[in-house]
Amino acid sequence: MMINFDNAATTFPKPLRVRRAAADAVMNYGGNAGRGGHQLAMRTSEAYYNARETAAVFFGAEPENTVFTLNCTYALNMAIHGVMAQGGHMIISSMEHNSAARPAVALAMKKQITLSVAEVFPDSERTVESFRRLIRSDTRAIVCTLASNVTGQLLPYREIGELCRQHDICFIADGAQACGIYDIKLSDGINILCTAGHKGLYGLTGTGLLITDGVYPIAPIIQGGTGSGSLSLFQPSLLPDSLESGTPNIIGAVTVGEGIRFINSQGTDNIRVHEERLCASFITGLKTIDGVTVYRDEGAEYAPIVSFSIEGVPSEEAAAFLSEKGFCLRAGYHCAALAHASLGTRNGTVRFAPSVFNTEAETAKLVYYVKILKNLQNS
């Protein structure tokens, strides 16, 4: 039996109620939401809207401003390309995932925008000041992850949101590693929140959300059928239709809605405390092993993710050994070039990312095998 500690990529297993919702959707929601007035389409539309409304309430948004996407990457691309469609200056952090960094760099390389990278420090005040110093008269957006997918470091997103408010700058937040374990709301100063449905929200893969307060228009980068204004050759301007072209992932959306209901039943604080306890146990265990480095800094706050390396053992080899022993952990660079450049981890790291379903016993077992691996390397 495999023990999944790669939940930062995709949570697994899924809650029972999510699995049941997926099966129910396959059986009963075979229509096309917003397309047609027959019973099957209407029933499917209702289920789709219920999922949208559940997500909207969870993040403190309006349902019409809650857009389902294929994943967080699509949401970030929509937000970045959409807000920066008229050009201008954008700032990203040095801990960004490639899903934010690559579209930003691509726009800069085409000279459609200018781009700056704000260094992230363990000290929140220094990080906020790093962003502040880069603001210019033409700065249109700041894009910032709420929590690093490599180390789990929490960025001071509320302070960054206030900085954006003071300067009339759009704050685009990547919540992929924070949503579901922290009580994230648009009222935290976020203008556009992008997140995954398949991670901390426990939905199926192929799901994501773009949630906006509606203050900053988002030019669509995909156009097509929306079920509304069908006689017009122009994309609708109203949300969510303007950003939801084509047949949506209705089954996936339904599971995201049910995943959020699961989180509500458990409590975000309870989920986070459980995962943090496992991380603390894991770090305590690693400290007993010579030659193991844990990538955490004093003074910084962390989401329940732990990156580590074993001296003399490439990260991919470490993860492969642990996989043979029944553990799933992510090795390498985690699609985060900027973050690893900032950390100086040229050989990558191994990432431990528990979920609400993992246990102390599983964590202790993993520490045992990390110790075995290190002893084998020393012999």
Image (cartoon, helix red, strand yellow):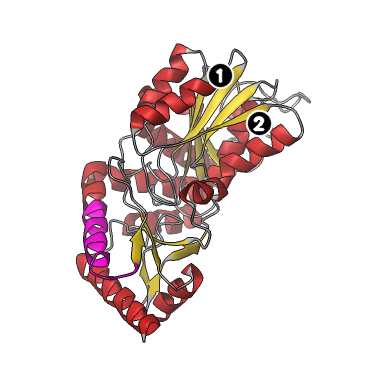
The answer to if 294 sits in the magenta stretch is: no
For label 2, the residue is 81
Q: Main secondary structure of the magenta part?
A: helix
> CB atoms at circles 2 and 1 under 8 Å apart?
no
The quarter in which the C terminus is drawn is bottom left
Residue 324 image offset from top left, x and y in percent: 42, 81
Q: Which residue is drawn at 45% across and 44% down?
A: 176
Foreground of the two, 64 or 330: 330
Identify the residue shown where x is 75% and y is 29%: 111
Q: Which residue type does callout 1 highlight? A: Tyr
Residue type at mark 2? His
Indicate whether 375 appears above or below 241.
Answer: below
Depth check: 333 or 100 in front?
333
Q: The residue tagged with tag 1: helix, strand or loop?
A: loop
Foreground: 280 or 33? 280
| 289 inside magenta stretch | yes
Residue 216, numbered label: 1
232 left or right, relative to 171: right
Q: How crowded is mark 2: few (under 14 residues within 10 Å), some or many (20 or more)?
A: some
Residue 28 percent across, percent down from the top left: 48, 52
For the residues labelled 2 and 1, the Cα–Cα distance comes to 12 Å
Quadrant assignment for the N terminus: bottom left
Examine the image and state in which quarter residue 36 appears.
Answer: top right
**For residue 204, side relative to residue 185 (left or right):** right
Residue interval drawn in magenta: 274-291
With 253 as the anchor, is 218 left or right in this view?
right
Crowdedness of circle 1 by 10 Å Cα count: few (<14), some, many (20+)? some
